[in-house]
Image (cartoon, helix red, strand yellow):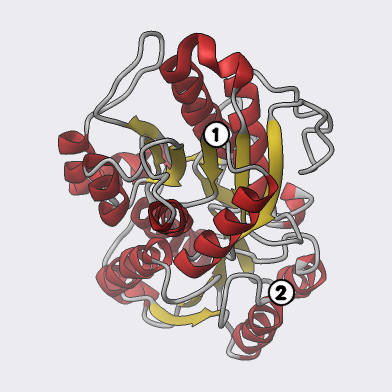
Amino acid sequence: MKKSVLAFGALALGVAFSAPAMAADVSACLITKTDTNPFFVKMKEGATAKAKELGVSLKSYAGKVDGDSESQVAAIESCIADGAKGILLTASDTKGIVSSVKKARDAGVLVIALDTPLEPADAADATFATDNLLAGKLIGQWAKETLGDKAKDAKVGFLDLTPSQPTVDVLRDQGFMMGFGIDPKNPDKIGDEDDKRIVGHDVTNGNEEGGRKAMENLLQKDPGINVIHTINEPAAVGAYQALKAVGMEKNVLIVSVDGGCPGVKSVKEGVIGATSQQYPLLMASLGIEAIKKFADSGEKPKPTEGKSFFDTGVSLVTDKPVSGVKSIDTKEGTAKCWG
């Protein structure tokens, strides 16, 4: 399955290769938000395997924690100095890192944003990502249909990423609101909504400990909270731990985004009700292919028709399907996690 998907992706990008030896002098960099989040671990696996296949020299960098933009800026400087042909970047600060990205592009480096679009998106040469707005809408629609008439009186909490509100955070957050039937107001900003069902927002740094603390904070605001949107599955697991500690784990519907193998397992076990699955290995593999093609021909990747980015796909994973929302079950989600 993975081989066929990657082959299709390469075809969609128009990538054609001769012998891997042609790329012997091609170097690339992968810069992720952290090197511990399973999502970025899988992304690194995909980039490493594809680089080895194509004979591309790859160096990998990561922030110390999600939100550590300084380390990412330093990594870009290192990549420029090393003469990298391309950089694959998941930015922690999607606005703040733009000047560093410009410096790289001015030096002739192809910069591809993975998963998280920059602000503005065209600050990068291309973006390979899940449609994060759609990912949010899917879990919002699922939560609304699951609650039925109770959705109109729901008490909803949001466990977001970081205070800087990177694009991936905003898109998933606002997408959930649209799917659930909440007016997000300014679609480019988190926290300006006035829907009475919203208990509040807190940040998690995308990890379990952050999710636990943020959930505790929201419970203090309103112990009657019954729906939680989480930026990713580690944060969702942390939220569940906080709820379980006070005997509320069966009273709150948790939804998330990522669809990693541990996350799908959490859906199967009932920790998470539904999650939107994305494909980081594919993002990174296609990114390496695009850098190789750019090095060989100077051609840059093109977006999916009708979109401003190359869409690597999304699927809703749940064992409790609802009418009107297309989904796959955890068996299929497990087979696909993280292609």
Residue 104 — which label? 2
Q: Amino acid at mark 2?
A: Ala
Q: Could you tell me the amino acid type at mark 1? A: Gly
Residue 253 place in picture, x, y as percent: 44, 34
Name the image quarter holding residue 73.
bottom right
The alpha-carbon separation of the residues under discs 2 and 1 comes to: 32 Å
Label placed on residue 136: 1
Q: Residue at x 36, y 38 (%)?
A: 250
Position of 2 compared to 173: left or right? left
Q: Nearer the viewer, residue 77 or 134?
A: 134
How many dots with numbers?
2
Up-down relation of residue 276 to residue 291 (above or below): above
Q: Is residue 206 shown to the viewer in this render?
A: no
| Identity of the residue drawn at 80% across and 32% down | 193
| Image coordinates for residue 21, horizontal then vertical, percent | 29, 76
Side (left or right) of 138 relative to 328: right
Residue 10 visible in this rendered orientation of the protein? yes
| Position above or below: 244 against 268 | below
Please identify the quarter of the rendering in which residue 58 is found.
bottom left
Residues 281 and 332: in front is 332
Identify which residue is drawn at 73% across, 76% down: 107
Against 119, residue 187 (above or below) is: above
